Image (cartoon, rainbow, N blue to C red):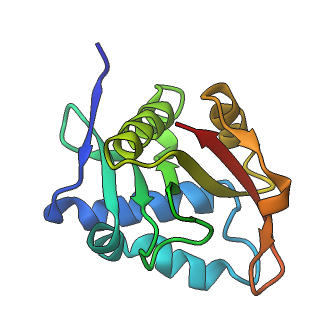
């Protein structure tokens, strides 16, 4: 039995989800680039993610948010690379103190299940080149690199594409 549960975030958890996301990205240095400040504001805005997608949280036995992820469908303002028939996984984050407990995997699996329920045929995501631990997780869960769908931010950062047929 796990010591956390994954579910759709409640409005009173949105701020905590935003804080966890920013902290998870900051601690690994993913915000240490010219796009970092603007991206941190986007990461913190969990209310927007809940409004335009599905905002998942992983909550520990004490009710603290220890992880979060977002699923967006075509047409959502949150999508970066999503096409018709796909769902997009965004902003997967696990609080530093909760890492190694399967939180990221549970959030990703819940996202895959949701994509299937919503009729998507493929899940897509973009990830910074430095996010190697996340890449290992995605590959273990059946995602494949899709370099033809890689893209760059306005600041020039490479975002590596991954896809998984559902």
Q: Is residue 73 above or below residue 66?
A: below
Q: Is residue 79 above or below residue 59?
A: below
User: For this rendering, which residue is in front, 30 or 76?
Assistant: 76
Q: Position of residue 152 (x, y in %)?
A: 79, 75
Q: Position of residue 136 (x, y in %)?
A: 71, 33
User: For this rendering, which residue is in front, 42 or 49?
Assistant: 49
User: Which residue: 28% across, 67% down?
Assistant: 50
- From the viewer's perspective, tell me whether residue 12 is left or right of residue 105: left
- Numbered marks: total: 0
Q: Is residue 123 above or below residue 61?
A: below
Residue 149 occupies quadrant = bottom right
Residue 19 occupies quadrant = bottom left
User: Which residue: 15% across, 63% down?
Assistant: 12
- From the viewer's perspective, tell me whether residue 22 is left or right of residue 159: left
Residue 103 occupies quadrant = top left
User: Which residue: 66% across, 42% down?
Assistant: 134
Q: Is residue 41 above or below residue 142?
A: below
Q: Position of residue 8 (x, y in %)?
A: 23, 50
- From the viewer's perspective, tell me whether residue 37 is left or right of residue 92: right
User: For this rendering, which residue is in front, 2 or 144?
Assistant: 144
Q: Position of residue 82 (x, y in %)?
A: 57, 65
Q: Quadrant of the N terminus?
A: top left
User: Which residue: 32% across, 50% down?
Assistant: 56
């Amino acid at each position: 039995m796990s010591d956390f549960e994954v579910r759709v975030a409640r409005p009173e958890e949105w701020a905590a989800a935003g804080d966890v996301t920013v902290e998870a990205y900051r601690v690994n240095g993913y915000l240490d680039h010219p796009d970092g400040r603007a991206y941190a504001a986007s990461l913190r805005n969990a209310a927007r993610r809940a409004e335009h997608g599905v905002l998942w949280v992983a909550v520990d036995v004490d009710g603290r948010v220890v992880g979060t992820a977002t699923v967006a469908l075509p047409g959502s303002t949150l999508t970066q690379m999503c096409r018709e028939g796909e769902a997009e996984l965004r902003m997967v984050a696990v609080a530093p103190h909760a890492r190694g407990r399967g939180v990221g995997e549970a959030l990703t699996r819940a996202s895959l299940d949701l994509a299937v329920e919503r009729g998507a045929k493929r899940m897509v995501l973009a990830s910074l080149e430095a996010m190697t631990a996340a890449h290992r997780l995605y590959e273990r869960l059946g995602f494949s690199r899709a370099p033809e769908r890689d893209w760059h931010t306005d600041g020039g950062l490479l975002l590596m594409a991954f896809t998984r047929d559902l």
